[in-house]
Image: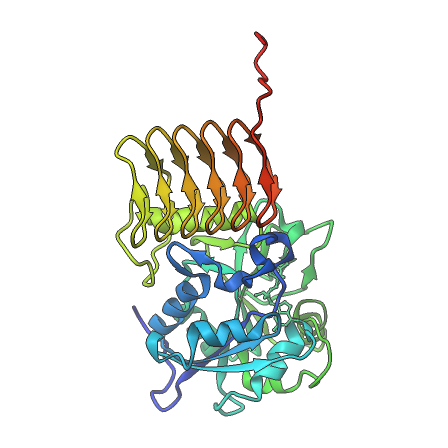
Amino acid sequence: MRETSLPSSERLEAILLVGGQGTRLRPLTLTTPKPLLPTAGVPFLAHQLAKARAHGVSRVVFATSYRASMFTDAFGDGSAFGLEIEYMTEDTPLGTGGAIRNAADALTCSSDAPVLVLNGDILSGHDISAQVDLHLSRGAAVTLHLTEVEDPSRFGCVPTAPDGRVTAFLEKTPNPVTNRINAGCYVFQRSVIDSIPAGEVVSVERETFPGLIEAGELVLGYADASYWLDVGTPAAFVQGSCDLVQGRLRSPALPGVTGESLLLDGAKVSPEAKVTGGTVVGARATVKAGASVRGSVLADDAVIESGAVVVDSVVGAGARVSSGAVLREVVVGDGALIGPGNELTSGVRVWPGVTLPECSVRFSSDV
Ligand code: GDD
Ligand code: MG
């Protein structure tokens, strides 16, 4: 992969924002922060880190808050990932801008160097090196990766002028003026990060970016149409995992070949079961004869009994789905038990350890 046109004396440093609580992904995030959720066989962040490294990043500062020690346990000093990793933890969350400013104390680059800043819940196929090159060649203060989505009201809406200059930053506005949104990957001049007030709660989206635009600084957009996904909801999380397994987004961190399914160590799938659509079958998880699993994530030690149907769902570690149960767009927490005959659909979330007893009610008209 092409690296940036940075002089070789400068190594590219990155700040990874991973302090959010992942509320929309509960119950999955009750015990594991969103960026550490197993995704296509590895912690989610492993995909982002492998990509950053392939684009010349050598040192990453994690901006942590929620369950900070779990990040250290998972990534250590970074050497296993070919990176140097540092951790900067906020006692209370400082917001995205405050977190970037806090993490900057651990950067080693000079004030005129570019720094890559990444939201920790994004899968993206865009060319980071091209974004950095654009930033350097235009002498921008900040360069934002932009993408287009159908519903921009859930994101930061970012209109641009024909020369790429960002003209406004409208975070989660009910009346978006364009479908072009902030894709959560920035190149900042280090000096711009240093100008964010230290030790305060600051939103980069609601304060820093609008302030820079207002002050006439050059905030640029790097727009492209490559694969892009924010995995902040259960549906998006499942989608991202399946897309990685099926090769819609190439990741250097995928622990296997792309295809209809990814079976992790010790997974057991009966030859009479159907496992398709980019499903991950976790370590030691079991799918029994006659079961059908499509487009789903089965965590380690999960069990899908004979004849159960699981579609577009997450089944937590050690959870069990009994014979004849049907799950569509459901999240089952770790260790939960879905009794025989239950039909769960559209956004149902079963909390960890809960048991749903056998459901003997028949919904068909001939009962
Ligand atoms: N350290 C730290 N401290 N990290 C934080 C904090 C904090 O106080 N608050 C949020 N984060 C991290 C989250 O962990 C996540 O990686 C990132 O900042 C963005 O937070 P989200 O909660 O995922 O925000 P969002 O998805 O609603 O919106 C953001 O991302 C969109 C793209 O997916 C915004 O940046 C939008 O403008 C953008 O369009
Ligand atoms: Mg997000």
Q: Residue furthest top?
A: 366
Residue at horizontal 31 percent and vertical 48 percent from the top: 267
User: In which image quadrant can residue 6 be found?
Assistant: bottom left
Ligand 1 located in image quadrant: bottom right
Q: Is residue 217 visible?
A: no
- Vertical comparison of 146 with 208: above or below: above
Q: Position of residue 33 (x, y in %)?
A: 55, 63
User: In which image quadrant can residue 261 be found?
Assistant: top left
Q: Position of residue 197 (x, y in %)?
A: 71, 84
Q: Quadrant of the C terminus?
A: top right
Q: Is residue 297 visible?
A: yes
Q: Quadrant of the N terminus?
A: bottom left
Residue at horizontal 70 percent and vertical 60 percent from the top: 170
Q: Position of residue 323 (x, y in %)?
A: 45, 30
- In the visual, does 64 lie left or right of 58? right
Q: Position of residue 333 (x, y in %)?
A: 55, 48
Looking at the image, which is closer to me, 90 or 183?
Answer: 90
- Vertical comparison of 294 with 96: above or below: above
Residue at horizontal 58 percent and vertical 58 percent from the top: 29
Looking at the image, which is closer to me, 13 or 324?
Answer: 324
